[in-house]
Amino acid sequence: MQDQLYNQDDYYQKVKETFEFLKASVPFSPEIIITLGTGLSGLAEACEKAWVIPYEKIPNFPKSTVETHTGELIFGKISGKRVALFRGRFHYYEGYSAKILTFPLRVLTLFKPEIYLVSNAAGGLNLSFKSGDLMLIKDHINLIPDNPLRGTNFEEWGPRFPDMSRAYDEELRERFKKVAASLGEEVKEGVYVAVPGPSLETPAETRFLRLIGADAVGMSTVPEVIVAVHAGLRVCGISVIANVNDPDNFQPILFEEVVKASQKAEKRLTTLVVEFLKTL
Ligand code: HPA
């Protein structure tokens, strides 16, 4: 499928085809699209599910290769809002191009939702962060050597050169912070840098990422956010800081620990998102 989807016209057709399939099957058009990151699928439990489908049953969807991601698309209601939830996502390190790994999101943008809410597990670079912290993403740096918009642009999907000066919606961020404060939760704010992975960073790379202005590092999210901004959605991104990487006292980063740490934060994040959605 990867090769097929590199063919630009074919990509357009496949997006349309998959959209038509979903349109004919799902109970409603979603207002909000949500992607749940590693260890963060708890929100799916808070969702009044109306329709669930495994990715492999959706025509043209890529296949997930990461065991920690189940891979299903859920349509349902959370806090009374019509949402589509991606439980499990695709990553560049799995071998997908940015265009292919954002295929599912591109399809859902054709429903004309208003908001994209995305979560991930990330490594903290800002040394005031600690494991379990939640960080609202205020900006990003893309170090994944790919862009989902590379190639033919389809004007009906968005502009050739989308502005990224306000990729992460400020009003949504302020709203989220208010909700967090009302629940006695502190949320940090910072810059997320996306690296290709799958190997984790060396101490020297970590020093570099701090120097260029990043507060957290991960291997996802940025390709999706580019597509969401291109499609005119308001984006809200949240990183769960699973580990903190100090270049001068570097500790091994064990992926199992990353998953465990984000699972520990899952309940808090779920509560916050449920309350946040109520205010929209
Ligand atoms: N680096 C990159 N990706 C990650 C990390 C990290 O330290 N933690 C969780 N995802």
Image (cartoon, grey):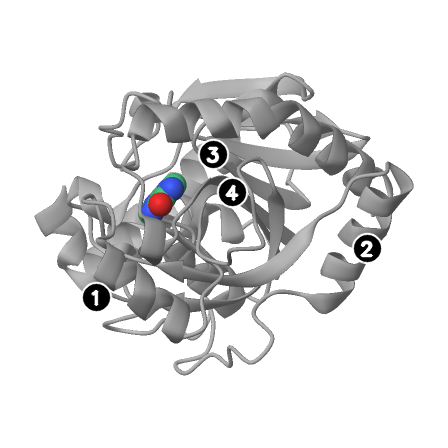
Q: Tell me which image quadrant ligand 1 sits in.
A: top left
Q: Is residue 112 left or right of residue 208?
A: right
Question: Disc 1 on helix, strand or loop?
Answer: loop
Question: Disc 2 on helix, strand or loop?
Answer: helix
Q: Which corner quadrant of the image does residue 85 belong to?
A: top right
Please name the residue that numbered disc 4 is placed on.
Answer: 241
Please name the residue that numbered disc 3 is placed on.
Answer: 22
Judging depth in this view, the residue of 15 and 178 nearest the camera is: 178
Vertical order, 270 against 179 (above or below): above
Pointer 3 and pointer 2: residues touching (CB < 8 Å)?
A: no
Judging depth in this view, the residue of 36 and 113 nearest the camera is: 36
* Residue 27 screen position, x and y as percent: 63, 27
Q: Earlier in the sequence, mark 4 or mark 3?
A: 3
Mark 3 vs mark 2: give the one in front: 2
Mark 4 vs mark 2: give the one in front: 4
Q: Which amino acid does the dot numbered 3 rest on? A: Leu
Q: Residues within 10 Å of mark 3 (few under 14, many from 20)?
A: some
- Distance from disc 4 to disc 1, alpha carbons, whole Å, reads 24 Å
The residue drawn where x is 51% and y is 55% is 127
* Residue 158 screen position, x and y as percent: 47, 72
Pointer 4 and pointer 3: residues touching (CB < 8 Å)?
A: no
